[in-house]
């Protein structure tokens, strides 16, 4: 299960509404890399595959590739505004270590492939 706060969901819905391609949804995933071994992937997509799991979270269609669910199950996404900026924050209960910027992680059972470059 993926959890998205109401604030983050509203922000994502606004962003989805600005997309030129109809029928887009939020795709979440994991890629090898980042300082800690895995990087989060979050973006809009309209390409569905048989490897995907579909969820409705806060009125958003959220898609995760089946293989990535083991890393993202229980993931919490929020949106925080700070002064004149803001951004999405991610809390992953599966992460045993994260980098300073919070965009990469590793788990107790898988370290991924960290990059030599800092985030």
Image (cartoon, rainbow, N blue to C red):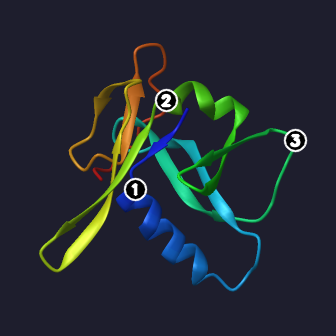
Residue 22 in the image, given as x and y percentages of width and height:
76, 78
Estimate the spatial distance between the alpha carbons at disc 2 and disc 3, rounded to whole Å: 24 Å
Q: Which mark is residue 6?
A: 1
| Closer to the camera in the image, 33 or 27 | 27
Q: Is residue 63 above or below residue 71?
A: below
x 36%, y 61%: residue: 7
Q: Residue furthest right?
A: 50
Label 2 Cα neighbours within 10 Å, binned few <14 / some 14-19 / many ≥20: many
Q: Is residue 88 above or below residue 90?
A: below
Residue 78 appears in the figure: yes
In which quadrant of the rendered image does the N terminus lie?
top right
* Mark 1: secondary structure: helix
Estimate the spatial distance between the alpha carbons at disc 1 and disc 2, rounded to whole Å: 31 Å
Estimate the spatial distance between the alpha carbons at disc 3 and disc 1, rounded to whole Å: 29 Å
Tell us which disc is closer to us: 2 or 3. Answer: 3
Q: Which mark is residue 36?
A: none
Tell us which disc is closer to us: 1 or 2. Answer: 1
| Closer to the camera in the image, 99 or 74 | 74
x 58%, y 74%: residue: 16
Residue under numbered circle 2? 112
Residue under numbered circle 3? 50
Residue 41 in the image, given as x and y percentages of width and height:
53, 52
Label 3 Cα neighbours within 10 Å, binned few <14 / some 14-19 / many ≥20: few
x 38%, y 33%: residue: 92
Q: Say which label, 2 or 3, has the lower sequence index.
A: 3
* Mark 2: secondary structure: loop
State the count of labels. 3
* Mark 3: secondary structure: loop
Residue 85 in the image, given as x and y percentages of width and height:
21, 75
Tell us which disc is closer to us: 3 or 1. Answer: 1
User: Would you say the residues marked 2 and 3 are in contact, meaning their CB atoms lie under 8 Å apart?
Assistant: no
């Amino acid at each position: 299960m993926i959890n998205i706060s109401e604030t983050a969901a509203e922000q994502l819905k606004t962003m989805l509404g600005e997309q030129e391609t109809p029928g887009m949804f939020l795709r979440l995933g994991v890629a090898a890399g980042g300082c800690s071994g895995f990087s989060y992937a979050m973006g809009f997509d309209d390409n569905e595959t048989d490897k995907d799991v579909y969820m409705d979270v806060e009125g958003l269609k959220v898609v995760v590739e089946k293989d990535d669910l083991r890393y993202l199950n229980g993931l919490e996404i929020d949106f925080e505004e700070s002064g004149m900026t803001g951004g999405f924050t991610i809390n992953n209960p599966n992460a045993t270590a994260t980098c300073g910027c919070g965009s990469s992680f590793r788990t107790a059972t898988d370290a991924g492939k960290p990059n030599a470059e800092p985030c």
